[in-house]
Image (cartoon, rainbow, N blue to C red):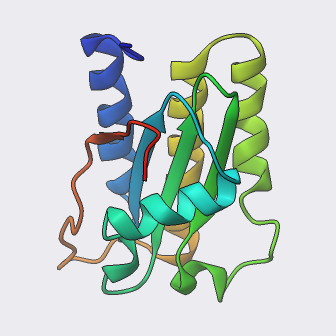
Amino acid sequence: MEIFTEEEQERIVQAINMAENNTSGEIRLAVEAHCKIDVLDRAAQYFRRLGMDKTALHNGVLLYIAVEDHQFAVIGDSGINSRVPADFWEETKDLMLQHFKQNNLVQGLIEGITHAGEQLQHFFPRQDDDINELPNDIAFGDGKE
C-alpha cells in the first residue's frame, strides 16, 4: 500500500527541514497503515526505535500516524516535557485533526510539523553550532513489532 506519492513525501520532508531551520529540536514522522496497540504506546516504540531518545538536548518530537486505523499521536522527549505543560501538543494535534477530518492527510501532517517546529523554537532556538542529529525522512512501518 502506497500511502504518499513521491511528491507528497518530498513536501513532508521539506516541511521537516523548514521546521528544524529555527530550532535545535528534532522532528520525525512515523507512518504505518495499522496500529495494533495503544497509539501512544506505539508512538513511544517508534520514538525509541528511531533513536529520538538519544538527542543531546532530549528535544525530539515524533508525529506518529496509523493511516488505516485513523489514529495518531504527537509525543516529545524528556527535555521538552520537563519544560512545557502536559497538554502542550494538543494544539498541534487539533490543527492536524482539522485537516484529517477533511481527508487532507498530507496538509495535516505539514501543518503539524510546522506548528511543532514553531513551538520548539520557543524553548530550543537554533544555535550557531547546531547539527541535524536525526534524518528528516519519513519512517514507514509495517504495523509489526
Residue nearer the viewer, 140 or 54: 140
Q: Quadrant of the N terminus?
A: top left
- The picture places residue 107, in percent across and down from the top left corner, at 55, 21
Residue 79 place in picture, x, y as percent: 52, 85
Q: Residue 119: tell me if it is visible.
A: no
Q: Quadrant of residue 130?
A: bottom left
Q: Is residue 132 left or right of residue 4?
A: left
* Residue at x-position 79% and y-position 40%: 94
Q: Nearer the viewer, residue 120 or 70?
A: 70
Q: Residue at x 62, y 54 (%)?
A: 74
Indicate left or right for 115 with 47 as reference.
right
Residue 136, given in percent of the width and then of the height, sits at: 26, 48
Q: Nearer the viewer, residue 88 or 128?
A: 88
Residue at 32%, 81% in the rendered image? 54
Q: Is residue 130 left or right of residue 68?
A: left
Q: Position of residue 116 (x, y in %)?
A: 56, 53
Q: Relative to 120, is 47 on the left or the right? A: left
Q: Residue at x 29, y 45 (%)?
A: 17
**Above or below, 124 relative to 99:** below
Q: Is residue 84 above or below residue 64?
A: below
